[in-house]
Image (tube, grey):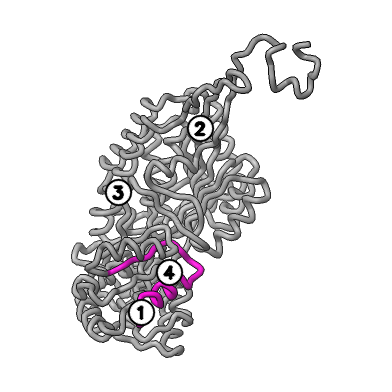
Amino acid sequence: MTELQHFPLIINGERCEPASGEYADVINPADGNVIARAAMGDKADVDKAVAAARAAFDDRAWREMSPADRSKVLYSCAHVVMQNAQELIELEIACSGATLNRASNLDIPAVADLWMNLAEAVKTYPFVSNQSPRPLPEQWHSQIFKEPVGVCGLITAWNFPLLLFSWKVGPALAAGNTMVLKPSELTPTSSIRLAELLQQVLPPGVLNVVNGDGARVGDAMTLHRGIDKISFTGSTRVGRIVQTNCASTMKRCTLELGGKGPGIVLPDADLDMVAQGSLWAVYMNAGQACESGTRLLVHEDVYDELLQKLAERSDQVIVGNPADPATGVGPMSTEAHFHKVMGYIESGVAEGARVVCGGEPATVAGCEGGFYVQPTVLADVTNDMKVAREEIFGPVLSVIKYSDVDEAVRIANDTDYGLSAGIWTGDLVRAQQLARELRAGSVWVNDWHMMRTDAPFGGYKQSGYGRELGAQSIDAYVETKAVQMSFERVPERKGMQRIVHTTLGQ
């Protein structure tokens, strides 16, 4: 029997055993088997990691590194990812159920691309800017500095471990911060390993990793007085807790939370393109993506025809072992989440939805212990049903009929979320107009998941606030300081001071 690999904490540049000595099993969702054991940290470990991060931040060599040198560090991080791509892909598949196709062709290239984009962005980012002198009431010189926040607590979700790692670590590094990262305890192995690999290009203490559950590690980080900023990706329910905890110490906080993405299908849309694209919108990563297109709003004139095409296309999607390159849809992340998704499908049927295809557990040969759900299309959904209101986070598409575009926009915006939205049409001018009416941080036309690493991503309403990706992501990791300098050296000429010193100039 092969000995399980152990993944410790990473603190101050070194592998570190947890204070409690506790390790937890990491389960492969493809077959239900234990594949590794990961350290489970607690408050003592968070304290140790924060101390290391603070010491690294207090080192002016890191904090005040020139943009040119910081660019080189970010390029080096990207090179580390590409040099170790095979190992990272294998870990990502085994711990999270990511398909080989996705991890190889999307995740790893996107991680490297983001950090290389940030490496270029820091060269021109306005860390220091000068305002023009103003002669009245006297000659003042003004500079605006954007400085690193300090020690950042980064909390990632279980669905895209490596991508979310890069989305937070990249801009935090670009701004000159130090950090403590908490990956999801369900899928920690690829994140811990990447953090370990990055120690070869980062000073000790700049990037620390404390794995563990939210009750012990997450709460300790969000309440910690030594952490200056929290960036969290996860559910809206937990996001509220994070926000409340951060308020106790007035921490800076950015949140990337849930979504219930609506896609509006106009009557002139290419239905073959819609059928393929809207399933890509909801089946990618087996639907376990916050920006998924989970509600498809279809005009009554093309409703029945599109349902038939959706069923035909969905039946061709291969559910299988994520390590198989032929697999298009892999497993749910955990057994508990599998039952949650199945419960949503059952609730949809109970409320009057019709199963067009799927709707049952899926069996994969050789992976009988895995947590698979058949790709599912539900028709005759109304926007008040549970499947239309709540985030299912599985391969389940809810199809809603509408009569006119104004109605479709109302339905699309009738949600607590505002992360993503889409429009399917042949009229691109009209699409641009409709995009302005949709209350979402990303609006995609005739496709989905179009997330460029040089464009901002984030949500409206209860999908959170703040933006990740692009040069704008650096904004969330800096403080802004104004430094004003007076050129007037003669006290009697200090015009504004005469408000108090009324005898000046007499």
The residue carrying mark 4 is 260
Q: Which residues are magenta?
A: 399-424
Q: Position of residue 408 (x, y in %)?
A: 38, 75
Please tell me whether mark 2 sits on a helix, a strand or a loop.
strand
Q: Amino acid at mark 1?
A: Asp
Q: Quadrant of residue 423?
A: bottom left
In the picture as drawn, the residue positioned furthest to the front comes out as 506
> Is residue 496 among what the camera can see?
yes
The residue carrying mark 3 is 110
Q: Is residue 122 above or below residue 441?
A: above
Q: Is residue 180 above or below residue 490?
A: below
Mark 2 → mark 4, Cα distance in angstroms: 35 Å
Mark 3 → mark 2, Cα distance in angstroms: 27 Å
Q: Position of residue 192 (x, y in %)?
A: 42, 47
Q: Amino acid at mark 2?
A: Lys
Q: Is residue 414 above or below residue 250?
A: below
Q: Is residue 171 magenta?
A: no
The residue carrying mark 1 is 404
Q: Nearer the viewer, residue 202 or 212?
A: 202
Please tell me whether mark 1 sits on a helix, a strand or a loop.
loop
Q: Quadrant of the C terminus?
A: top right
Q: Is residue 425 above or below residue 485?
A: below
Mark 1 or mark 3: name the one nearer the start of the chain: 3
Mark 1 → mark 3, Cα distance in angstroms: 38 Å
